Each structure stands twice: as structure tokens, then as C-alpha cells.
Image: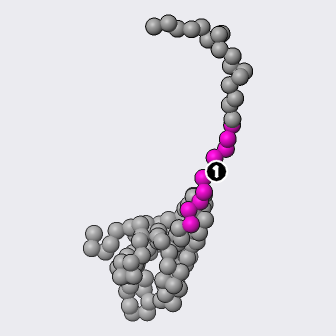
Amino acid sequence: MIIEPTSKFNLESISLKSEIILARKSNKKIEIVVVPKLKNKLSHQKNVGIKLDEKVILTILSNHYSNVIVTQINTQNDLNKLLMRKPDLVLSGVKYFNFGDKELWLNDFLDLHKIAYIASSRKA
């Protein structure tokens, strides 16, 4: 094997291009679903399984997705509006909603309407 000294090659003749590759953001629609927070931050909300910092999650996801929103669900009508927007993915720490005397589990509701979500079902 013959190894040529590197000085024989003219490195100046090699053109190196510096390119910045910008990743395109996905157009998937993502909704971060929250419920109103209690006034006493130390209080436990039984219907919330995981407390999420929706602002941090919104910031992170917005770097990769162009359509990310935070939705606070106060009423059944708010949930129906979410259905009409047809998100590709719902992310939430909410287990269920109390609408009057009715308990509505978020993941069962999303399964029924074939909306993908990040969380486990009530059965788990």
C-alpha cells in the first residue's frame, strides 16, 4: 500500500460549502388539554393524574410543530369544540372531567372519537 503525503494534494482547490439545513415544522395539530387550576397550589385535584407545565410543553412542541395550542376545558361545550378542531394528537395529564353530576373520562372520550392521545386509558 502506497500512502501519498498530504502535501501533494491542493486543499485550496476543494470547495467546501457551508449550508444551514432548516427542518420544516410538521403541520400536525396538537392540543395540550388542561383544566382550571385550584387557587391553593398545594391542593390535590383527583381528576388530574399528572400535573403538566403546559407553557413549557407548548414551547418545546412549537419548535417542531406549527399547530400547537393549549386548551382549558371548563365545560362539555369546550370538549365538543376540541372535537370540531380534530387534533391529530392530544396531550394531557387530566384523567376525567366533572360536568355537573356526570364524570367523563378524557381518554375514553378520545377513543370514542378516534383521536390519538398520550396517556393510558382508564382500563390500564
Place residue 61 in its image quadrant.
bottom right
Query: How many numbered discs?
Result: 1
Which residue is the site of mark 1? Answer: 22
Q: Amino acid at mark 1?
A: Leu
For the point 41% across and 71% down, the residue is: 116
Magenta part, dominant SS: loop
Is residue 104 toward the left or the right of residue 31 in the image?
left
Q: Which residues are magenta?
A: 18-27
Q: Position of residue 29 (x, y in %)?
A: 53, 71
Q: Quadrant of residue 119?
A: bottom left
Quarter of the picture containing the N terminus is top left
Q: Quick check: can you spot residue 38?
A: no
**Residue 70 placement (x, y as % from top left):** 57, 72
Q: Is residue 40 above or below residue 3?
A: below
Seen as rendered, the residue at the extreme right is: 12
- Which is more toward the observer, 65 or 117? 65
Which residue corresponds to the image point at 51% horizontal and 84% vertical from the top-left? 84
Is residue 119 visible from the viewing direction of this image?
yes
Give the percent coordinates (x, y) of residue 66: 61, 65
Secondary structure of the residue carrying tag 1 is loop
In the picture shown, does residue 17 fall above or below 10?
Answer: below
**Residue pictured at 63% horizontal, 46% vertical:** 21
In the image, is residue 122 part of the stretch drawn in magenta? Answer: no
Q: Nearer the viewer, residue 8 or 26?
A: 8
Question: In the figure, 91 relative to 21: above or below?
Answer: below
- 22 inside magenta stretch: yes
Q: Nearer the viewer, residue 32 or 2?
A: 2
Query: Does residue 65 appear to the left or right of 19 in the view shown?
Result: left
The residue shown at (27%, 69%) is 124
